[in-house]
Image (cartoon, rainbow, N blue to C red):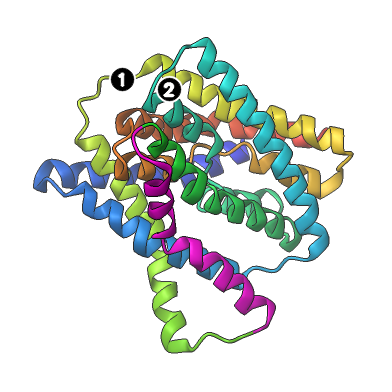
Amino acid sequence: MTYFVYILINNIVPISIMIAIGSVMYRAFKVDIRTLSKLNFYVFSPALVFVKLYESEMNLHVLMQVLLFFVLFFSLLFALIEVVIRVKKMQGGMRSAMRNSVIFYNSANYAIPLNQTVFAGNTYTLSIQIVIMIMQTLIPNTYGIYTVNAHKSTLKATMKTILSLPVIYAIPVAILLRYFHVPVPHSIYLPLEYISGAFMATALLTLGVQLGGMKWEFHFSNVLVSNMLRLAAGPALGFLIVWLLGIEGLTAKALVLSCAVPTSLSSVLLAIEYDNEPEFSSQAVFSSTLFSMFTIPVVIYLLDFM
């Protein structure tokens, strides 16, 4: 019950308020969603990634173990989604939208505070979640962009789009500066902190604006499938992989918990920026965030049996 109340008060209610504000803003002022999307992709997201990476603490052993888990988890989840897509005979942009709604999950603004609450501020479990966050930032900005453009653009044009994104360069720069202990001047780092702090609010407002402008032709069947794969199949695969790899203790628990969070806002931002099933993507994020209030306490309860 404690986890249920925590998730409700600290995740669902604040997120819902921000989404509602975005929806009201659209209804009142017809806010330009393309401008918001550009701000998220080219300003707020790169700043967030740089700051999180530059401030993170991790060692090589944790990094390699988590990366192995992530590769296996991503591969199995991807294979499962492909089976579902083929069984449901999805076509065109819906195929990539469904994949993105499941394989991209909220590993930062939702998973990090959840991790620190469940594990009482443990720095070791936080380092594990940081590694997951890095991967979940890199993939949407590479593979994610490729998939939403593959059916309507050439490979050369898609690669040009990917290479134009600042986040691609923010990741190696942050890692190198941290590894070599190079200090970032305060006059530069302070605005980066301000901008990174605005990411969550801007992303949620963007989702609200998208929801406010939708026709609400609800994609019930596809959204339900997406939610089940993300919230049920995701953590189930996590349990399976840590068992197969023989990972135990806090490491295993932190990895499984990282698989249980709802769909990332990245899937919505990709859908809006590249006009690829934005209504379905918005509904998938909103509903998975809402339903996670019920599924995550179950996962947390099961962690005690590991």
- Label 1 to label 2: alpha-carbon separation: 8 Å
Q: Residue 223 carries which label?
A: 2
Q: Is residue 182 above or below residue 157?
A: below
| 47 lies left or right of 204 | right
Disc 1 marks which residue?
A: 218
* Callout count: 2
Task: Indicate the position of residue 77 as horizontal and vertical percent values.
Answer: 64, 30
Q: Is residue 166 a member of the stretch shown in magenta?
A: yes
Q: What residue type is labelled 2?
A: Val
Residue 306 seen in render: no
Q: What residue type is labelled 1?
A: Phe
Q: Residue 261 carries which label?
A: none
Q: Is residue 95 a member of the stretch shown in magenta?
A: no
| 138 lies left or right of 33 | right
Location of residue 187 (image quadrant) = bottom left
Task: Indicate the position of residue 51 as horizontal and vertical percent values.
Answer: 52, 70
- The prevailing secondary structure element of the residues shown in magenta is helix
Q: Residue sitting at 44 percent across and 51 percent down? A: 159
